[in-house]
Image (tube, rainbow, N blue to C red):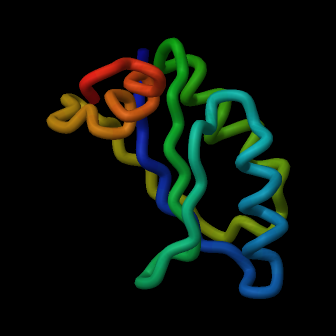
Amino acid sequence: MVTAVILISVERSKINEVAENLAEMDGISEVYSVSGNYDLIAIARVHDNEGLSDLVTRRMLQLDAILRTETMLAFKAFSRHDLDTMFAIGIEGK
């Protein structure tokens, strides 16, 4: 499994529309609107580098309002907080 953080600059009037379109794409697990130099951050989780390449260089390119992206590969997860919370539902003692 390949995890990547994709920083995205978008036309100002299209931020919400692009975020919703990204959230519906296979391979994108989360989309956040953020402050700072970028407008959105997408978390991609795909099977391999080919899947990431397809996502970033083909499918995301279909969204004309995306102006620029920067993709960072995640090497190692140091916190499993979100997964632990999700799988702890209904387990006593958590």
Which residue shows up at 55% across the image and 62% down it?
32
Examine the rendered structure and indicate whether residue 29 appears above or below residue 53.
below
Q: Residue 70, position in %: x, y?
A: 45, 57
Which residue shows up at 52% across the image and 13% down it?
47
Which residue shows up at 83% across the image and 63% down it?
64
Residue 75 quadrant: top left
Q: Is residue 29 left or right of residue 86?
A: right
Quarter of the image containing the N terminus? top left
Q: Residue 28, position in %: x, y?
A: 62, 38
Q: Residue 20, position in %: x, y?
A: 79, 57
Q: Is residue 36 left or right of residue 60?
A: left
Q: How many marks?
A: 0
Q: Residue 45, position in %: x, y?
A: 51, 28
Which residue shows up at 73% across the image and 74% down it?
15
Quarter of the image containing the C terminus? top left
Pick the residue in front: 18 or 57.
18
Q: Is residue 86 left or right of residue 46?
A: left
Residue 91 quadrant: top left
Q: Is residue 77 left or right of residue 92?
A: left
The residue at the far left in this view is 78
